[in-house]
Image: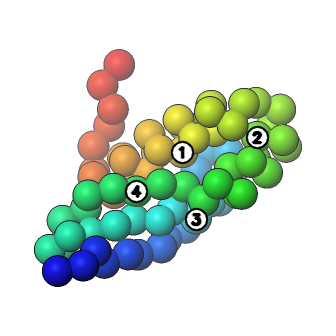
Amino acid sequence: SCLQRKYFELNSSIGNITIKAAYYKGELIKYSPEYEECREIAVEEKISLQQVYDLIKKEAAEKLLGQKSQK
């Protein structure tokens, strides 16, 4: 069986960004923000690309998995 991919827009704290999500047998197995959109936000916000990725992935996890990260 192959992966099912879905795209959705995340209204994050630093802007809207497209998230690619991959599902296998209906279960979320991975997700990632669109690189180019993250790069644009990094330039606009004057922060590193890694900071954008980390923030977006955290907020996407909260939306996709319905859980807050523990810190």
Q: Residues within 10 Å of mark 3 (few under 14, many from 20)?
A: some
The answer to whether residue 50 is left or right of residue 43 is left
The residues bearing labels 1 and 3 have C-alpha atoms spaced at a distance of: 10 Å
Counting residues from the N terminus, which is met first, the one under dot 3 or under dot 2? Answer: 3
Tell me how far mark 1 sits from mark 2, CA to CA.
Answer: 11 Å
Foreground residue among 4 and 51: 4
Tell me which corner region of the image, top left, top right, bottom left or bottom right, holds residue 31. bottom left
Q: CA distance from mark 4 to mark 1?
A: 11 Å
Q: How far from the left and from the top, in percent, is residue 15?
A: 68, 52
**Residue of label 1:** 56
Residue at x 27%, y 43% (from the top left corner): 67
Decide: marks 1, 2 in contact (CB < 8 A)? no
Q: Which residue is mark 4?
A: 31
Q: Find out whether the residues at labels 3 and 4 contact each other: C-beta distance under 8 Å.
A: no
**Residue flagged by tag 2: what amino acid is it?**
Ala
The residue under label 2 is 42
Of tags 4 and 1, the one toward the viewer is 4
| Distance from the alpha carbon under mark 2 to that under mark 4 | 19 Å
Residue type, label 4: Tyr
**Could you classify mark 1 by the number of other residues whose Cα lies within 10 Å: few (under 14), some (14-19), or many (20 or more)?**
many
Chain-order first, disc 2 or disc 4: 4
